Amino acid sequence: MKTIILFRHGKSDWDADYGHDHERPLADRGRKGARKMGRFLTTSGTVPDHAITSTATRARQTLAIAAEHGGWTGEATVTEAIYGAGPEDLLRVIRDAPEGADTIVVVGHEPTFSRTISRLIGGGAIEVKTATMARIDVDVARWGDVSFGRGVLVWLLSPGFLKPNRYRKLQEAIQQTKEAAETAAGIATPDRDD
């Protein structure tokens, strides 16, 4: 199983002094969203083994802040192939992920992410707001085997959902789910006395 986290960059600062769209930095709200999502990903037990980010300033800043606040220590790749990419381009980036990684986080842009998620899961209208993450599981052994239509959307979550009370409830729900899975595994494989 391979897990892809598509992570749209945080809210950017349109009033900042920048020359080209590529250099537009994060706004305060964007930094806050990146912090929340970094912590969430770690809390959910989906820590990435490898990160891939667009070269755009706002994407690189989003990854750096999320990794710091989530405590992620995996390697990161910065690539121009994500900025201005289409779904086919993004699929090539995913297929080139290091084989030793089972979970990757890809930080990038719209509308590429909405279109790519839709194609990975075989259709549907998806909206990826700023600092939103989507987890897609693909039942393959190698990144090179990831293809459109083979993924399952596990969750799609924005920082607005992670308000303190909601976040605590989410942590409790994750823990209950883990406990239920462990209980179910114990029931499915009972000890036999032969």
Image (tube, grey):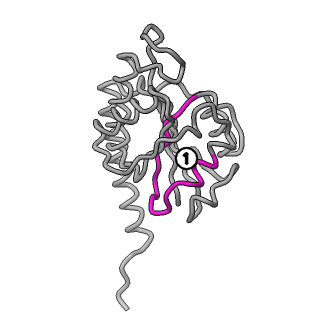
Give the position of the C terminus as an image quadrant: bottom left
Could you classify mark 1 by the number of other residues whose Cα lies within 10 Å: few (under 14), some (14-19), or many (20 or more)?
A: many
Q: Going by the image, does 86 lie left or right of 141?
A: right
Q: Secondary structure at mark 1?
A: strand
Count of marks placed on residues: 1
Residue at left offset 35%, top offset 23%: 31
Whole-percent x, y for residue 109 in the image: 56, 30
Above or below, 90 relative to 143: above
Whole-percent x, y for residue 169 in the image: 33, 34
Above or below, 38 relative to 94: above
Residue 9 belongs to the span the image colors magenta: no
Whole-percent x, y for residue 38 in the image: 35, 36
Residue 98 belongs to the span the image colors magenta: yes
Residue of label 1: 136
Q: Going by the image, does 113 lie left or right of 156?
A: right
Q: Amino acid at mark 1?
A: Ile
Residue at left offset 45%, top offset 70%: 188
Q: Going by the image, does 129 lie left or right of 29?
A: right
**Quadrant in the rendering for residue 186:** bottom left
Magenta region: 91-109
Residue most toward the front? 19
